[in-house]
């Protein structure tokens, strides 16, 4: 009887053993890195073993959606940064798109990133006030994501030697220079995303990056500043985007209306994605819009894979007479996709289809396969060889 009781007790103790606490710190840090830091910090109440585990986390994720009051969120950020004992932070992510953070706290976050050699910094903030320029002093950064609904005064050039990925979203870039060249000193920059960026610049926006492989430009807007508070749309014919990226292989461009774009020396370009929103059809009669688009297509002629939106197809179809006078742009095309999104279209106009594929040595095969493919919910047509 005693024997059975002893075995049962032993078995019960073994099943109740805290095996998680026996794991090494490095593995615990890895596990906690997948959750928001609010819940990682709460593990300190589990036992003495867990009291300081969170203070050495290599990944800090702080999101205001897990807090009912903005004051509590601000206090939590400050406490986490004060108690962090990790000298090299892999990732610091602060997300507060609906709640303002105090200037002193924003400055503290950026100072923390610089002093703790943060490698990936992700800031999504509503109207942040602070010395945001100090972000560009953080030489340890490999990935920088800024989603800031505010103006961002910039240096003439960003010089971050280790930076590989830069994502700018809803940022207002300001410069008085005639030729705005921001990225040329980022010698290792490979991925660049400009999403809903507002540009208040004089004439030319230069994107020059010797190692750039992937470039995404989505809905950028040019403004002219009348004074400190009033801005208005700049005439599209007076502004130009110049891209110099000899290693570029992937290019995605989304716009409401065509704009002047120059792409020099991109012999490795393979994948091109061009989208034009239906609202942009309002601008089809604007002077030079059609030729801006034709000029852009000609400069992307090395593409082997092309994806276009139905909005862009409709834009081209509205200029049928001028389209027939233009040379075929794509000489190496092997794949074509037409995305319809929420728009409806029974078929692609033959003159537009011919314009896109006839420059390719595989044009006949592409046209033949075009007739055989089936429509899907999001992809109207997809053909490839």
Image (cartoon, rainbow, N blue to C red):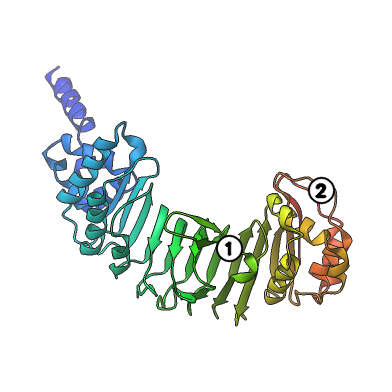
Horizontal side of residue 203 vs 117, given as left or right? right
Q: Quadrant of residue 171?
A: bottom left
Measuring from the top left, give residue 255's x and y in whole percent: 63, 58
Measuring from the top left, give residue 337's x and y in whole percent: 73, 59
Front position among marks 1 and 2: 1
Q: Which residue is disc 1 drawn over?
A: 234
Measuring from the top left, give residue 231's x and y in whole percent: 50, 57
Which residue is found at the position 59% from the left and 70% from the top? 239
Element at label 1: loop
Q: Quadrant of residue 146?
A: bottom left
Residue 342 in view: yes
Q: Which residue is disc 2 drawn over?
A: 345
Residue 248 in view: no
The crowding category of the residue bearing disc 2, from other C-alpha atoms within 10 Å (few below 14, some 14 to 19, many at least 20), is few
Alpha carbon of mark 1 to alpha carbon of mark 2: how far? Answer: 33 Å
Q: Which tag, 1 or 2, sits closer to the chain's start?
A: 1
Q: Residue furthest top?
A: 1
Which residue is found at the position 62% from the left and 81% from the top? 267
Horizontal side of residue 30 vs 258, given as left or right? left
Element at label 2: loop
């Amino acid at each position: 009887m005693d024997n059975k009781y002893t075995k049962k007790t032993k078995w019960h103790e073994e099943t109740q053993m805290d095996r998680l606490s026996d794991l090494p710190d490095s593995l615990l840090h890895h596990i906690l890195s997948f959750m928001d830091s609010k819940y990682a910090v709460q593990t300190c109440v589990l036992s003495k073993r867990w009291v300081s585990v969170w203070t050495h986390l290599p990944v800090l994720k702080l999101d205001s959606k897990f807090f009912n009051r903005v004051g509590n969120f601000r206090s939590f950020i400050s406490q986490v940064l004060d108690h962090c004992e990790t000298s090299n932070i892999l990732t610091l992510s602060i997300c507060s798109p609906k709640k303002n953070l105090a200037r002193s706290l924003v400055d503290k976050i950026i100072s923390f990133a610089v002093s703790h050699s943060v490698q990936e910094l992700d800031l999504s903030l509503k109207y942040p006030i602070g010395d945001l320029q100090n972000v560009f002093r953080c030489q340890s950064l490999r990935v920088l994501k800024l989603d800031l609904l505010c103006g961002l005064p910039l240096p003439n050039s960003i010089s971050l030697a280790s930076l590989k990925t830069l994502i700018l979203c809803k940022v207002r870039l300001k410069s008085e220079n005639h030729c705005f060249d921001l990225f040329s000193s980022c010698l290792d920059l490979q991925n660049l995303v400009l999403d809903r960026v507002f540009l208040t610049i004089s004439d030319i926006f230069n994107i020059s990056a010797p190692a750039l492989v992937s470039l995404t430009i989505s809905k950028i807007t040019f403004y002219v500043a009348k004074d400190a508070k009033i801005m208005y749309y700049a005439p599209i014919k007076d502004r130009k985007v110049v891209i110099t990226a000899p290693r570029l292989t992937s290019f995605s461009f989304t716009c409401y209306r065509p704009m002047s774009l120059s792409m020099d020396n991109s012999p490795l370009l393979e994948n091109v994605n061009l989208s034009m929103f239906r609202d942009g059809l309002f601008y089809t009669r604007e002077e030079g819009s059609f030729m801006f688009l034709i000029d852009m297509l000609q400069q992307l002629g090395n593409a082997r894979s092309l994806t276009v939106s139905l909005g862009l197809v409709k834009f081209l179809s509205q200029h049928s007479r001028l389209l027939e006078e233009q040379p075929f742009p794509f000489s190496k095309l092997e794949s074509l996709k037409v995305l319809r999104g929420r728009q409806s279209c029974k078929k692609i106009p033959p003159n537009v289809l011919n314009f896109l594929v006839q420059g390719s040595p595989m044009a006949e095969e592409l046209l033949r396969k075009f007739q055989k493919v089936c429509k899907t919910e999001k992809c109207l047509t997809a053909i490839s060889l």
